Amino acid sequence: MISKKKQYKALLLDLDGTLLDLDIEKFIPAYIEALSAKFNGFVNRDRFVQYLFRATNKVIQNNDPLKKNETVFYEEFCRLLGLSYKQIKPLEIEFYRDDFPYLSCWGREHPCARLVIEAARRKNLTLVLATNPIFPAAAILQRLSWGGLSEELFDLITTMENMHFCKPNPAYYLEITNIINCLPENCLMAGNDTIEDLSAAEAGLDTFLVEDFILHRSKEEPFSNYRGSLKDLAFFIDSLKD
């Protein structure tokens, strides 16, 4: 870990694989199977999965600052399925209320997550749950609870309903800094994904690569200002200037 110390005003934290110990290789297939079953009266499973990924990719690629991620997703998803928003939304509400909780078996509390939150609060840092906003708030808040954490701990939680961009688009991070009224250079982004989380550097934020469940999807050696375990991150925050 680099020993340089800097004064920060905000800490952005990834969720899956960072604050939450999530078996992503089992969670995603289980999530897709459960969600596709909700729509089996309208479309077969394979076509549903294809449409879901196409609509999600549309959100990830969006650069329109006037369209929230939720709008982009449903415009594309409804078009592909040939269903209206009024037909889809009740099914989604039912899914996240009745079916999604069963997926909690793939998520576990990270023993050091609370240490990071507590350290950030001691330093009076603005705290952002910077999870990729391709999911609705209902899904994000449930996953947060799987990690033993709650909505009240954060000043901002990014969801598909309140954001216009996604990781790894640097505009996503700039939108966060604008919402919390903090200069990018005064923010630290911490996460385990060498592409999605470390892209914050392109927006002018410093980065901390959390190595507990590192997701390395690039052939190049990732650069981050700091790196270490989630426990190291808690110690690092405590060592920052007041």
Image (spheres, rainbow, N blue to C red):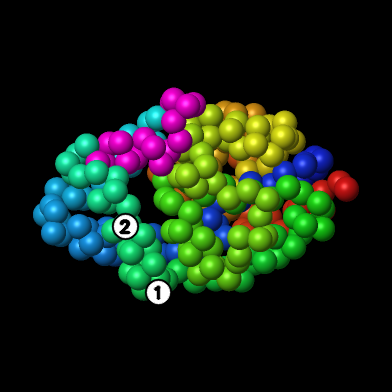
State which region is magenta.
Answer: 63-78
Camera-side residue of 63 and 238: 63
Q: Amino acid at mark 2?
A: Pro
Distance from label 1 to label 2 (Cα)? 25 Å
Q: Give the x, y percent position of residue 58.
A: 33, 34
Q: Which residue is mark 1?
A: 105
The residue that appears at 57% across and 28% down in the rendered structure is 202
Camera-side residue of 236 and 134: 134
- Seen in the picture, residue 170 relative to 187 is either above or below; the reply is above
Residue 68 belongs to the span the image colors magenta:
yes
Residue at disc 2, secondary structure: helix
Residue 91 showing in the rendered view: yes
The residue that appears at 47% across and 44% down in the rendered structure is 161
Nearest to viewer (mark 1 / mark 2) = 2
Residue at disc 1, secondary structure: helix
The residue that appears at 76% across and 49% down in the rendered structure is 125
Camera-side residue of 43 and 222: 43
The residue that appears at 39% across and 37% down in the rendered structure is 71
Camera-side residue of 90 and 198: 90
